[in-house]
Amino acid sequence: MTIKKMVLGLSMLLMASTWACASPSAQQKKETEMKETLVRNIDAAFMRQNIFDYKENPTKFVFKGKRPAILDFYADWCPPCRALSPKLTDLAKKYKGEIDIYKINVDNEGELAKFFGVKSIPMLLFIPMEGTPIQTLGNLSVEELEQTIAKIKVKK
């Protein structure tokens, strides 16, 4: 009987330690959540509800956002897109609460890519609170990104 209890106890201990090692730490969870919320991947439904309802207003850009925004049209397989991504994450940290940055995967969101006329990636759309969005193409330098952000940012 004691051998059965020992085997059962060891089995439970092994399962618990395996589970503990496999679970991400609180710090890892926090870092993942922070990265996910700084630059958010969005789809057409989110776009229509929170940024711009392109079906309701197909000929006029009516911005629904609470802050200026940057839309990054990208693809996972695109080297310039991958090179641009950490720059956008850094800018999202720097301008947290002032500018929203969103990513749109053109392979998954073909309707959005078509509506916005995406022919080349990465394509960025810088959206001011009022006025016309600014479109850029390619892996911009941090300086070029900052200059364009200055054009859309709310003046304090």
Image (tube, rainbow, N blue to C red):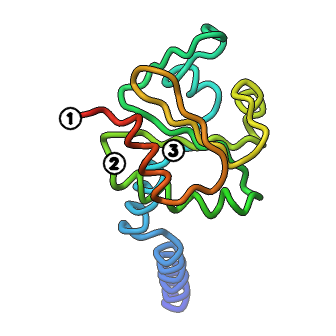
Q: Residue furthest left?
A: 156
Q: Is residue 126 above or below residue 15?
A: above
Q: Residue under circle 2?
A: 95
Cα gap from disc 3 to disc 1, whole angstroms: 25 Å
Q: Residue at x 58, y 20 (%)?
A: 48
Q: In the image, residue 129 lies at what x, y percent?
A: 39, 24
Q: In the image, residue 132 lies at what x, y percent?
A: 51, 23
Three-letter code, disc 3: Arg
- Looking at the rendered image, the disc whose residue lies closer to the viewer, 2 or 3, is 2
In which quadrant of the rendered image does the C terminus lie? top left
**First-in-chain label (2 vs 1):** 2
Q: Is residue 68 above or below residue 27?
A: above
- Looking at the rendered image, the disc whose residue lies closer to the viewer, 2 or 1, is 1
Q: Residues within 10 Å of mark 1 (few under 14, many from 20)?
A: few
Q: Nearer the viewer, residue 90 or 145?
A: 145
Q: Residue under circle 1?
A: 156
Three-letter code, disc 2: Tyr
